[in-house]
Amino acid sequence: MIGACSFLRKKRHHDDAAFYSHWLNVHGPLAAQLHGVTQYLQSHFMADSPRTNDLARSLNVNGLAEMWFETEADREICYASEQEKVCDVDSLLFIGASARVVTDVTPVKRPPREPAKGKRVFLFNADGTRELRSAFRALSELPGITGITDHLVTKPGAEPTQEREAVRIAVSRIVTVGANEPRRLDRAQDILLAGAGNDVAVFDSTEHYLV
């Protein structure tokens, strides 16, 4: 499975509510029509949450868009399409900066097609190749964990077609964990980050499914 993961930063004049509303209710349905997308979800980051760490806040990003494709050919067709041009035009209205990476996606525990009640997004910097199989097994057995996704970054994606600032972010791995109760994620975080040091950005998030 191929992933296209985009980190978004809002335009400076937008407040959080306006940014998230446009992304979810206007841009989301446009992006959901793109060719070959088998799953599309948005993670809206909660910078004010005590469970979002300082490293995450320092990155100054507001959310993560995940698009999954069956093949690399589907992803390439998607980003060369006329519908993608429509999405690019709309992006100018609310996105101030962005960065996209291409990933190899493994749904460790495939989430249901509905938003999790709580979600954490973990960005690994230099430690993306760390062995996580035992941690994933333990997470899968935790009560209340509804989904675990592992994105290994394979390459940067194409630069946005429109002129705007790029988000400067170094990430080698993205792990997302969803739960049916937000408090379940604290134990999941302890397991996932055991021995990981301080170079993992942790975002407390809300999750929104479009496809």
Image (tube, rainbow, N blue to C red):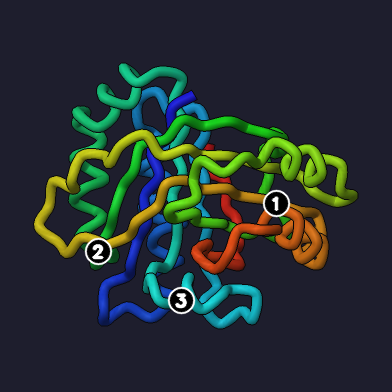
> At which x and y percent is residue 40?
49, 39
**Res 120 quadrant in image:** bottom right
- Mark 1 vs mark 3, foreground winner is 3
Q: Estimate how packed mark 1 is, as few (under 14), some (14 to 19) or many (20 or more) residues with alpha carbons within 10 Å.
A: many
Q: Are marks 2 and 3 in contact (CB under 8 Å)?
A: no
In the rendering, which numbered label is found on residue 178? 1
Residue kind at label 2, given as amino acid type: Ala
Residue occupying the point 60% across, 49% down:
176
Dot 1 or dot 3, earlier in sequence = 3
Residue 129 x, y percent position in the rendering: 51, 40
Q: CA distance from mark 1 to mark 3?
A: 20 Å
On screen, 63 above or below 128? below
The amino acid on which the numbered mark 1 sits, given as a three-letter code, is: Gly
- Please name the residue that numbered disc 3 is placed on: 57
Q: Is residue 108 above or below residue 70?
A: below
Position of 186 with respect to 75 (left or right) is right
Q: Which element type, helix, strand or loop, lies under badge 1? A: strand
Residue 97's tag is 2
The label shown at residue 11 is none
Label 2 vs label 3, nearer the camera: 3
Q: Earlier in the sequence, mark 2 or mark 1?
A: 2
Kindly identify the residue that appears in the image at 41 percent across and 39 percent down: 153
**Circle 3 Cα neighbour tier, 10 Å, few/some/many (<14 / 14–19 / ≥20):** some
Marks 2,1: beta carbons within 8 A = no
88 with respect to 120 (left or right): left
The span from disc 2 to disc 1 (Cα, nearest Å) is: 26 Å
Q: Is residue 105 above or below residue 8?
A: above
At numbered mark 3, what does the secondary structure look like: helix, strand or loop? helix
- For label 2, the SS is strand
